[in-house]
Amino acid sequence: MSDVLEKALINALLDKYERSSAYKSGTAPERRVMLSLVGNKRSDFPAYDIEDYHKRQAINEAVTALSRQGIISFEWLRGEENHILQCVWLNSDNIEEAYRYANRPPVKEQITAVIHELDRERALIRTEWIALYYDQTVKYMREKLRFPATLPKGKTERKALFQMLRLIDSASIVSVTERVFSEKCFGDSKYFENHLKSILLSVLRKYVGDMSDAELLQFVGISRYPEPLEMRGDIIVNGNEMRAFEKGFCLYSNEIDQARIKLPANMKRLITIENRANYFAYRQGEDELAVYHGGQYSPAKKTLFLKLAEALPKGCAWYHWGDIDFGGFSMLLRLRREILPSVQPYRMEREELIRYRDFTRTFADDYAERLQRLSNQEELSDCQESLAYMQEHRVKLEQEAMLLSD
């Protein structure tokens, strides 16, 4: 019992020490690293109950034993000498002995070791949002000397997280259910839901976009049901002409791999549309195809887009109509990088921001910083007028506003 109490005291003191500015800067503490045991404030060590003789006496003995070893010092409450402790503190010239006694590596060593793990994983990754997650996690840990909420402290859970992100990065998941994904990744159909689902959702929400849980999981190919891939216009799928469906039709994500897609030679335009309301309101001509894009596209929708790009006839232009905001332009950037470099923006110019200025919305500093990073991408050099106007006036515009005004 005494050994347990002694280690609990040392760990409580080391926890406080590792939160101090002295520890983070690597300098000797100028102030005592101290735990108050009684007084007007709440006790820093709640196990010390002055009303319980046996608990109090056990901790008194643990403190005096550690003091004899030179690891800590203490002070009795005035008038209660040898009876009630006022406070205890680490001896700053014997902190290394405290770590050895607690059998605890300093948090700097733990952080350094985990940063090496992250660096190794980062070198294996090609997916931009995963790479950004690793980069910013390393930056946070170096600056704060602690784990972010999106990184497990346990080595086993951390290894599982790395394994999951490598599978997502491999692009081998197109459309599977949560349990199939978990079985494929961990050999356990419930491991993902029980241990990593909430972390993955937090990472996706931060580095991909603020969408619903279902949309975020769909982005990496995890769906409760097959995802509908909606389009409308002149297209031939598996030998069937689909132009007769005036209101459009859909393929499902679990059949897109086998789908054979052909576009007529006279097609002049293909347009992907981010918002569902705008997709239904858009009236395409006889020589074009409209495709519902939705939010950041999933692996299944990427397969559809790649097949459309391959089938695109000579002289047919691909347009993307998205919100005039970070999301809309990041989707355009992704289409250009992953599908077809010549994809053009549709109704996403500065003039649209001016025309619908009464419907624009403002944004905060952190959004402005993200927008600035997007503006620096060479692939969006032709969109600079719109991006610059957004940043100068701190405004963005959603597609639905155009429908309201029109």
Image: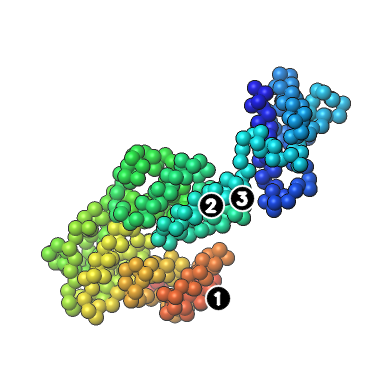
Q: Image height check: is 236 above or below 166? A: below
Image coordinates for residue 233, horizontal then vertical, percent: 21, 69
* Residue pictured at 74% horizontal, 26% vertical: 65
Q: Secondary structure at mark 3?
A: loop
Are the residues tagged 2 and 1 within 8 Å (C-beta)?
no
Mark 2 residue element: helix
Q: Which numbered disc flags the more N-terminal residue, 3 or 1? A: 3
Q: Quadrant of residue 227 in the image?
A: bottom left
Residue under the point 14% across and 67% down: 241
- Residue tagged 1: 392
Quadrant occupied by the N terminus: top right
Say whether residue 364 is left or right of residue 328. right
Give the class, few, some or many, for how many residues have Cα within 10 Å of label 3's Cα (few <14, many ≥20): many
Identify residue type, mark 2: Ile
Picture coordinates of residue 245, whole percent (x, y)? 18, 65
Q: Is residue 148 above or below residue 87?
A: below
Q: CA distance from mark 2 to mark 1?
A: 38 Å
Q: Of the residues under marks 2 and 3, which one precedes in the sequence? A: 2
Specify the quadrant of the image occupied by residue 231.
bottom left
- Mark 1 is surrounded, within 10 Å at the Cα level, by few (under 14), some (14 to 19) or many (20 or more) other residues, namely few
Looking at the image, tell me whether mark 2 or mark 1 is earlier in sequence order.
2
Mark 2 vs mark 1: in front: 2
Residue 145 is labelled as: 3
Residue extending farthest top: 54
Q: CA distance from mark 2 to mark 3?
A: 11 Å
As drawn, the label of residue 115 is 2
Residue 391: x percent and y percent?
A: 53, 73
